[in-house]
Image: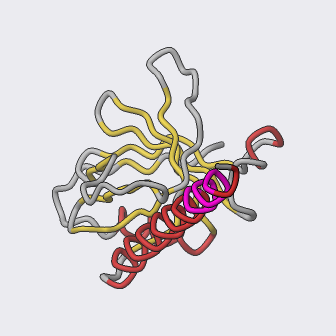
Amino acid sequence: MGGQLAVDAGALLAALVLLVALVFVLLSARRWLFVRRGGTVECSLRLIAGDGSPGAWRLGIGRYKGDELHWHRVFGFRSRPRQVIHRRGLVVSNRRRPGPDEAEGLLPGVGVIEVRDGDRTVELAMGASALTGFLAWLEAAPPGFPVDLHQPE
């Protein structure tokens, strides 16, 4: 009986290791497919509540699709974006370096930009080249697109 229990525990452990490996492969394949299509940047995101309190930073991938930035969580299985930021009417209200309490949860060397899309306020944390690309994407809006780029004083 003791030998059977050891075999069952070993099979359960092997199945668990196989499941973890499968999840890792699926997440890697999903990320590879996003990056392969082009127009993607590593981008952390957090929502700012109506009272100004920030939520938690979430690591993700932003993908430019026309006049929208689709944001997908890195550790997720959904093919649809979690957040969609529309270029039309977007207001960039602040640009800063992450504070010491935030830096631990973000990739090294990122800048934080606060944007308002209607009633929603979102902070995006990107590397310098991704941030430059984001601002260029905003400035390249077609004529008639109301895009407001406020520079912090």
* Horizontal side of residue 24 vs 102, given as left or right: left
Q: Residue farthest to the left? A: 144
Q: Is-magenta flag for residue 10?
A: yes
Q: Position of residue 118 (x, y in %)?
A: 29, 33
Between 140 and 12, the one lying in front of the other is 12
* Image: 20 above or below 55: below
Q: Give the prevailing secondary structure in the magenta stretch.
A: helix
150 above or below 70?
above
Of residues 96 and 73, the one nearer the viewer is 73
Q: Residue at x 30, y 82 (%)?
A: 37
Q: Residue furthest front?
A: 1
- Number of dots carrying numbers: 0
Res 131 visible: no
The answer to whether 73 appears left or right of 69 in the picture is right
Q: Residue furthest top?
A: 51
Identify which residue, 97 or 45, lies in the foreground.
Answer: 45
Quadrant placement of the C terminus: top right
Question: Is residue 9 something that shows in the picture?
Answer: yes
Give coordinates of residue 28: x percent, y percent: 47, 74
Residue at horizontal 77%, vertical 49%? 103
Residue drawn at x 73%, y 42% as measured from the top left:
102
Q: Is residue 67 above or below residue 120?
A: below
Magenta region: 4-12
